[in-house]
Amino acid sequence: MARAAVPGRLTWQVATLSAARWENPSARTLVLDVPGWPGHLPGQHVDVRLTAPDGYQAQRSYSIASSWPTPDGDRLELTVQRLSDGEVSPYLTDDLPLGGQIELRGPVGGRFVWRPQGTAPVLLVAGGSGVVPLMSMIRTRAVLGDRHPFRLVYSLRSPAELYYGEELRRLASGDADLDVHYAYTRAAPPGWPGRPARLDAAALAEHGWPPESGADCFVCGPAAFVEVVADLLVDAGHDPGRIRTERFGGTT
């Protein structure tokens, strides 16, 4: 992977919003120009810092959604979910204009990352906006022309909260080694087989990889979701050493 992230002292960089798009009514993807961006590994995140005119600063971490390498040079994509009680996310989703600037620092994180070396299949399990770093892995695989078998099991409350729906459909339709399964917990789209339900052991067994496959598993989402899924995978017989988790706000 060209210009992969190199550990070292991180410094704040100025990023300029060059484009943006809504993924759903509460999640906006920011396309940022970051001159001299050192590259990243899919799964890493950045720290974002906002500074008010009076000098007050607020800082949050956001997963990187874009691949590396990218088709557009030193560009970085972050998908931000608006939190009604948030301090930073409402500005990034609703107020940051094209041409506006923010500060970011990164890439950060070295365990919850996918590297294309090796031969193991990959199981990605997302809860809600936890799909963002997993999308970076899917996009990087596509950009590199990598043929690792990927399976994404994506749990979300309703179709209205779907991220990257059209892109996932397009990528999966042209790639026999990429399978995407949605698990709706509250409302399913018309014609969807089955009833909305929480992701369980049966669904993971049907749409994931069996333990004997030696799959590398990446689980990202709210803390309670991640804990349940990780326990289900271990109970099913997956090697705990191959299960990497990232909860909102922390990595294990």
Image (spheres, grey):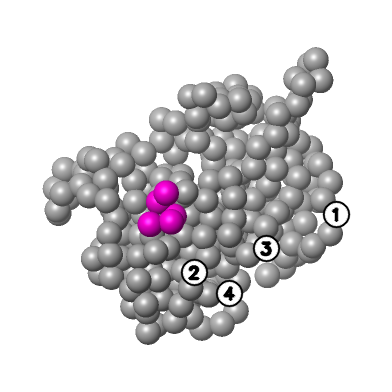
State yes or no: discs 3 and 4 in contact (Cβ < 8 Å): no
- Look at 28% across and 70% down and name the residue there: 205
Q: How many marks?
A: 4
Q: What residue type is disc 4 on?
A: Pro
Q: Which of the pair 63/251 is nearer the observer? A: 251
The quadrant in which residue 179 appears is bottom left
Residue 9: which numbered mark, if any? 1
The quadrant in which residue 199 appears is bottom left
N-terminal-most mark, 1 or 4: 1
Q: In this view of the protein, can residue 131 be seen by the observer? A: no
Where is residue 93 shown, x and y percent of the image?
Answer: 55, 29
- Look at 33% across and 73% down and name the residue there: 236
Q: CA distance from mark 4 to mark 2?
A: 16 Å
Q: Can you tell which of label 4 and label 2 is closer to the viewer?
A: 2
Query: Could you tell whether 250 is left or right of 38 in the image?
Result: left
Q: CA distance from mark 3 to mark 2?
A: 14 Å
Q: Can you tell which of label 1 and label 4 is closer to the viewer?
A: 1
Secondary structure at numbered mark 4: loop
Where is residue 193 shown, x and y percent of the image?
Answer: 14, 54
Q: What residue type is disc 1 on?
A: Arg
Relative to 85, is 180 above or below? below
Report the quarter where the C terminus lies.
Answer: bottom right
Residue under label 2: 243
Q: CA distance from mark 3 to mark 4?
A: 14 Å
N-terminal-most mark, 1 or 2: 1
